[in-house]
Image: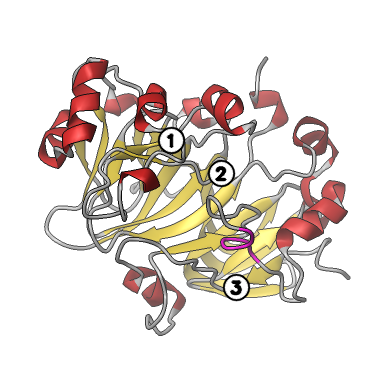
Amino acid sequence: MSSDNQPVALPANQPRQFYRGGAAIAALRDEDVAGRGPEDWVASTTTQFGKAEAGLSRLPDGRLLRDAVAADPVSWLGSGHVAEFGADTALLVKLLDAGQRLPVHCHPSNAFAAEHFGCRHGKTEAWVVIGTSGPDPTVYLGFREDVPPDVVEGWVAGQDAAAMLAALNPVRVSPGDAVFVPAGVPHAIGEGVFIVELQQPTDFSITLEWRGFLDGPDAGHLGLGYDKALGCVERRAQDVEALVRRTRALTGASVDLLVPRAAPFFRADRLHVSGRAALEPSFAVLVVLEGAGAVGPVAVHRGSTVVVPHAAGEVEVIGDVVAVRCRPPRVSDLGS
């Protein structure tokens, strides 16, 4: 049967990045870290900003997943999803291993992306923490207090990294934590944090803290100029408790990982399979964290990444497996 009707195991897909990392991905996959990068774009139909193909995943038969989905979207995504999104998975999944602190940055909303990039998707995202290292694994999420626009502009113009970071909410994280990051909310991921990242399928990033990370300011505003790009920044204070779920102690067959606000953008759950379990029909991306077994006809083990087409139907998972399952939003969750 063709790969468009059965789960498919995918190899690593690590386009070049501007920051250090990758050892945790190599360890998860039991691969040599040499030449690998800090991000693995899993089942990606999204390119890096301004690139023709970098970031796209290939199926084992050599086709780009993007092209396979475009050729048969209903098999891959299901008729309800196609009615809403067309041949668009509405999802990008990454493994991200922060070998250094990432810069303070944010992402556009749907409305901002539509106005300035002609794209229906902004870049709301979520981080499922699957590993940490070092003495203080921390992420930084949203401003602690409301910040006037001229203050943000001053920080960016002067590249005052200390002030930007101090203005954000520090959140200590450990495996099992899941963090929802709405579009516009400034954030940074600290050194030693290893995540499965779900996001809308774009590569739009407004980098507030470009010095020491990017070649210059022009690389940080996506060609808009900072006067316009900073219009996407959410300057209101954030209640981080409403954005974070701590799930490490939860061991049900399927553990919802994300806060309810994430539902219009994507879904994530952690599967705990001992013996066998049936998964309902859905386009899905699975990252196996522990154990070994099979997802349909595909043998899996720790570090396996699998894309499941909707046409595979009710897929059976066999063995002793812990995996993060990532899915697009239910069409019924999108609202008006």
Identify the residue at horizontal 29%, vertical 38% (top origin). 208
Question: Predominant secondary structure in magenta?
Answer: loop
Position of the N terminus by quadrant? bottom right
Q: Nearer the viewer, residue 92 or 148?
A: 148
Residue 121's place in the image compared with 305, above or below, is above
How packed is label 2: few (under 14 Cα within 10 Å), some, or many (20 or more)?
Answer: many
What's drawn in magenta, residue-wise?
Answer: 52-57
Residue 10's place in the image compared with 146, above or below, is below
Q: Nearer the viewer, residue 277 or 112?
A: 112
Q: Position of residue 250 (x, y in %)?
A: 39, 45
Would you say the residues marked 1 and 3 are in contact, meaning their CB atoms lie under 8 Å apart? Answer: no
Q: Position of residue 15 (x, y in %)?
A: 49, 66
Tell me how far mark 1 sits from mark 2, CA to CA.
10 Å
Q: Say the numbered circle drawn on residue 293.
A: 3
Question: For the residue labelled by badge 1, is the local secondary structure a helix, a strand or a loop?
Answer: loop
**Lower position in the chain sequence, tag 2 or tag 3:** 2
Residue under circle 1? 107
Q: Amino acid at mark 1?
A: His
Identify the residue at horizontal 35%, vertical 31% (top origin). 226
Identify the residue at horizontal 53%, vertical 50% (top origin). 49
